[in-house]
Structure formats: C-alpha cells, structure tokens
Image (spheres, grey):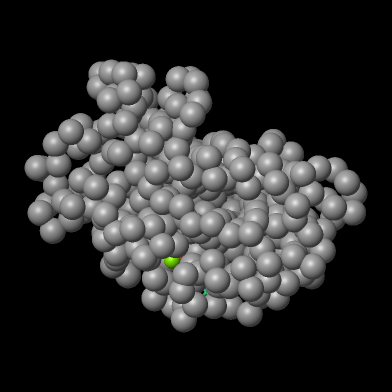
Amino acid sequence: MLPNLPRASLLDFCRRMLLIRHFEEALVDLYNKGHFRGHYHLYIGQEATGVAALSCLRADDYLFSTHRNHGHLLARGAEPKRLLAEILGRADGYNKGKGGTFHTAVASLGFLHTSGVVAGIIPLAIGTAYASKALKNGRVTACLFGDGALEEGAAPEAFNLASLWKLPVLFLCENNGKYGAGQAVGAAQSSSMAAHPLTDLPQAYKIPSQQVDGVDAGAVHQVILDAIKKIRQGEGPQFIETQTVRWPGSETNWPTVPVPTDVALAWDVNSVPEKVREWYRSSDPLLIFVRELVEAEQVTREEIAALERKAKEVIAEAVSFALASPYPKPEEALKDLSA
Ligand SMILES: Cc1ncc(C[n+]2csc(CCOP(=O)(O)OP(=O)(O)O)c2C)c(N)n1
Ligand SMILES: [Mg+2]
C-alpha cells in the first residue's frame, strides 16, 4: 500500500527509490570495468524499507548502518556523486576515499558510522542513544542491520542495556532471507539464526518488537512512524523486522544485474529472463511502488518514466564526477585517524 502522505512526498519516495536502484546498477558496471576492487553489497530489493523508514526520522537524529549501506545513505539524502567517489576510493568521496563501500560515514547527515563488521555498529548505536538520553536532546538513534547481525553476541548485549536503560533507539533489522513472494510475513526464517521468529530475541529483553513486509512502503512507513513516536515519548527501544525477498542479483557471490531496471517492467515483465522473472513481477519494491502510484492516479506512466530519466542523468553525472576525482595522495593515509 502507499504511505498515507501527500503526492509530493510520494513522488519524493519514488525519486529516492529510483536513485538507489540506478546507483547500484551503475556500480556493478563500474566494478566489472575494474574501477574499484574488493567486495561490495547492493541494496536492491530493500529500497522500500530504507526510503520509507528513514523518512520518519528528524534531521538531527543519529544513524548507523552496515555493509549494505548505500541505499540507506541515499535514502537519507547523501549526494550520489560523493558517495560514488567514496566507493571508488577517490579524494572527493565523503571520507576522502578512505572509508569505501563498507565504512562511508556522513556525519552531516547524522550517519556517524557504517561498518562491514557484522553487528559492530549495534553497541555504538546504544552509545549515542545513551548520550541523547543523558543530554535530553530528544534525538533518536536508528540502528540498521541485517538478520545475520543477531547471531553476534554484540546484539543481545546491546538489547539488554538498551532495554534496562530505556534508551531512545530504533533497532531496524532487515531480514532479506524471505524466499518466496506471497509467503506470509512471519514465515521468513533467517538461514543464520536458530531463533524464529527473530522478534523472539529482542522480546526476551522486553523490547517491543514487530514484523512488517519490507517490500510494502506504506506498511513500513506506518510501523516505523509509530515506533519512533513511542521512542520519542520516552518508552525506550523498539525493534522492527522488515522482511524482503532477496534480489536474484545478490544471490551470487558477486553482484550481477539480471536485467537493467526500466520502470516499464512494472507493467510487463516479459523481457525479464524467465529464471528471475517472478522476483521482478512480485517482489521488486520499486516496481510495486510505481504500479501503486499509477493505480492510485497520483501520477501517470509518462511522469514516472520522466522521473526515471532524471535519476539516470543524476547517476551518469555522478559516474563522471567520481571517475574524474583523483585518488588521495599517499601522505593522506595517516591523516584523520584516531587510535
Ligand atoms: C563479524 C563479522 N563476521 C562475519 C562477517 C562476514 N559477513 C559479511 S556479510 C555477512 C552476512 C550478513 O548477513 P546479514 O546481516 O543478514 O546481512 P545481508 O548481507 O543479508 O544484508 C557475513 C557473515 C563480517 N563481515 N563480520
Ligand atoms: Mg540477511
């Protein structure tokens, strides 16, 4: 369903989801052409969660994210060109090319840290939440992580303190292990967790917890809005598990784009290779959102196509900017470090 928001906000959701999708697809091309090295992870398939959830935060809130952070940063308003330069290890990147895909931090957006260390951010997030509570500044900390993070000891240790001290923190667990469209929310089982449902774990620490369909922007928006309201009222931490079906391009060890996204696929997926067609037909959050917008007569197909052309232009400019940006000088290596 569509979020209960004015048309301009819905179009803004659409714009952000399109930016994320085309940014990530462009990144695969850059990797395949040898413009950066090392592992990387894409946010495709989870756009509705990131965009809807982060829209509920205030500009002065704190955020922490994981190895799958590009979509979160873009949803929060990061500039595609500076994010891309960072991933390519260039001097004009947000962290002068020293953070890379796994560790881009954008403090001006409240993103104090993103980390490739699974669950590494969870104890840090309760640190800012503790500070906010002590300072009484009303800020919420949003801690975004995957289902796999729950298997690390850092997660339950942080849940315990967050609950005991009623810290203003949102634990948003993106479970991308759901294996079939149409499967009920709640049926998704993480391949790395014995606990099932995953919400059993935070609930053991008396943290109110809910599951929601992460492909459904309207449902995510409603649940996160409610959770943040409770946190700001001083009720302590809240845990939300969003469930998405893993994008087929992320099934392989290295991301691959099975078919370049074109919003026209929202109405006809016949050009998609049969092997992956079902995902684009029924589990792609972007195509679902676009279809809902048109069905609700909020926008025409032509307007959506124009939004997509604009997103592609922005990404093409970002690619040119990032490729033209120099690598950091060797003497930069030991600057901006703390030990
Ligand atoms: C502490 C730690 N252990 C293992 C890894 C290797 N690793 C990278 S991604 C990943 C899976 C994480 O799963 P999840 O949190 O569900 O995120 P997803 O990739 O599914 O979005 C693992 C085990 C790591 N980066 N850090
Ligand atoms: Mg996962």
Image quadrant in which the C terminus is located: bottom right
What is the x, y in percent for residue 120? 63, 69
Q: Work out whether residue 3 can be spotted.
A: yes
Q: Work out whether residue 102 can be spotted.
A: no
- Could you say which is closer to the camera, residue 58 or residue 206? 206
- The image quadrant of residue 338 is bottom right
What is the x, y in percent for residue 172? 57, 56
Counting every numbered tag in the picture gives 0
Q: Residue at x 54, y 57 (%)?
A: 210
Q: Quadrant of ligand 2?
A: bottom left
Query: Eyeballing the image, is 166 above or below 294?
Result: below
In the image: residue 182, left or right of residue 4: left
In the image: residue 226, left or right of residue 2: right
Image quadrant in which the N terminus is located: top left
- The image quadrant of residue 200 is bottom right
Q: Residue at x 46, y 42 (%)?
A: 219
What is the x, y in percent for residue 12? 47, 27
- Could you say which is closer to the camera, residue 201 or residue 278? 201
- Could you say which is closer to the camera, residue 208 or residue 217? 208
Q: Residue at x 82, y 58 (%)?
A: 130
What is the x, y in percent for residue 251? 29, 65
Query: Eyeballing the image, is 55 above or below 192?
Result: above
Q: Residue at x 34, y 35 (%)?
A: 289
